[in-house]
Amino acid sequence: MKAKVHITLKTGVLDPQGKAIGHALESLGFGGVEGVRQGKYIEIDLDETDPGKARAAVRGMCEKLLANTVIENYAIDIGE
Amino acid sequence: MKAKVHITLKTGVLDPQGKAIGHALESLGFGGVEGVRQGKYIEIDLDETDPGKARAAVRGMCEKLLANTVIENYAIDIGE
C-alpha cells in the first residue's frame, strides 16, 4: 500500500519559509498572492495490505517521527 | 481561491532525505517500509476568482520559482 502524508503547520504558527516564498513571488511579478504556507509531503510504500493497519502504522510514524505535533498537523491518505 | 501544490522528485532522482526517513523509521521499529520519498506541499491563497486563470498563474509560479523542473514534478489543485 502507499500512504501519502501531508504535514502542515498549525494555524497561528508562524511560517517564515512560506512568507519568504510569498515575497519572492511578489518580486517576480506575481500579484494577487494573499498568503503562502509551506508544508511537507511524504509518500511511504508499505508491505502492509490492510488499509486499517496501514493507517494505524503511519499514524504511529507521524506521532513518533514525521510530525512535530506541538506545531504541526498531519493528514494521512491510504491508497494503492 | 486556494491552490495546493505538490512538488515531488522525478522518478530516478535520488532522494537522500527520504532514505534517511526510511532508515529512521526502521530503527524506531517500524517494519515493512519499502520506500519513502519526501516532497514539498505548498498552499497559496490567491485573489484570483477564475479557476483557469488561477491555475495558469500557479503554473507560472511553479515553473519560475517553486519547482526545479529538471529534477522535480509539480501537481496543482485549485479549490475554494
Image (cartoon, coloured by chain):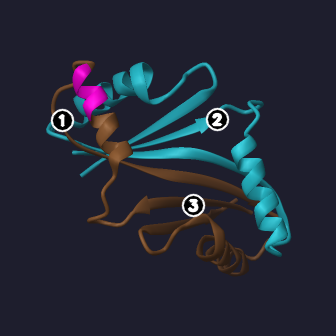
Chain colours: A cyan, B brown
Provide the residue designation for mark 3: B5
What separation in Å lies between label 1 and label 3 (alpha carbons)? Answer: 29 Å
Main secondary structure of the magenta stretch: helix
Q: Specify which label sits upstream in the sequence, 2 or 1.
A: 2
**Magenta residues, as a range?**
B23-27
Q: Amino acid at mark 2?
A: Leu
Under circle 1, the secondary element is: loop
Amino acid marked by disc 1: Asp
Q: Is residue A50 above or below residue B65?
A: above
| Label number found at residue A9 | 2
Q: Which chain contains the residue that carries disc 3?
A: B
Q: Nearer the viewer, residue B61 or A77?
A: B61
Q: Amino acid at mark 3?
A: Val
- Classify mark 3: helix, strand or loop: strand
Quadrant of res B78: bottom right
Labels 2, 1: one chain: yes
Q: Which mark is residue B3?
A: none
Q: Viewer-proximal residue, B79 or A8?
A: A8
